[in-house]
Image: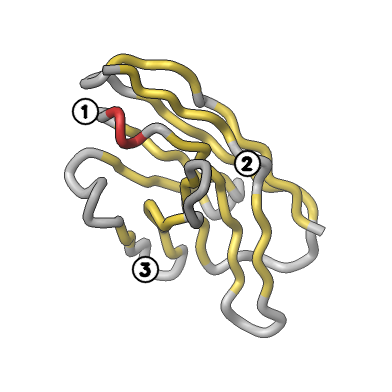
């Protein structure tokens, strides 16, 4: 069983920055990618960014491209999300996801960390 612990959320003014961190522990298999999602009340959880360990490629939601940067360390099973030029619409609970695509496939989620951007 993989446990994920997120940190770094908080309250920031529009235009400010925050850095989220996620560390994974436990489990006997290695992930293929780690990423971040976010969710606001009444809405589905949406993709934000992901980093793939093989090749180091990254993906971003259009809404955060150019403002957010994801980085990770496969050896430490950790991933960070640097969020710059924050907007009020970035306000959400941010969740870290650990994913394995190869067999046996698996997904694990963190407990979430609140990010609030004031206007």
- Residue under label 2, please give it: 23
- Residue under label 3, please give it: 55
Which mark is drawn over residue 40? none
Q: In the shown orientation, is residue 75 left or right of residue 103? A: left
Residue 85 in the image: state x and y as whole percent: 21, 28
Residue 21 in the image: state x and y as whole percent: 52, 35
Q: Is residue 20 above or below residue 68?
A: above
Disc 2 residue crowd, few under 14, some 14–19, many 20+, Cα 10 Å: some
Q: Which residue is the extreme one toward the bottom? A: 103
In the foreground, 106 or 72: 106
In the foreground, 34 or 15: 15
Q: Is the Cβ of the residue at disc 3 closer than 8 Å to that at disc 1?
A: no
Q: Quadrant of residue 57?
A: bottom left
The residue that appears at 34% across and 36% down in the rendered structure is 90
Mark toward the start of the polypeptide (2 vs 3): 2
Tell me the mark number nearer the camera, choosing from 2 and 3. 2
Instruction: Estimate the spatial distance between the alpha carbons at disc 1 and disc 2, rounded to whole Å.
Output: 24 Å
Quarter of the image with the C terminus in it: top left
Q: Quadrant of residue 112?
A: top right
Q: Is residue 104 above or below residue 29?
A: below
Q: In the shown orientation, is residue 118 left or right of residue 73? A: left
Mark toward the start of the polypeptide (1 vs 2): 2
Q: Which residue is the extreme one toward the front? A: 42
């Amino acid at each position: 069983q993989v446990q994920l612990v997120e940190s770094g959320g908080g309250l920031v003014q529009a235009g400010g920055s925050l850095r989220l961190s996620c560390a994974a522990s436990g489990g006997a298999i290695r992930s293929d990618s780690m990423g971040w999602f976010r969710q606001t009340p009444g809405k589905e959880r949406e993709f934000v960014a992901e980093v793939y360990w093989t090749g180091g490629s990254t993906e971003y939601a259009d809404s955060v491209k150019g403002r957010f940067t994801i980085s990770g360390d496969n050896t430490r099973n950790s991933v960070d999300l640097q969020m710059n030029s924050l907007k009020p619409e970035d306000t959400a609970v941010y969740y870290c996801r650990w994913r394995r695509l190869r067999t046996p496939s698996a997904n694990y989620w963190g407990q979430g960390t609140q990010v609030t951007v004031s206007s």
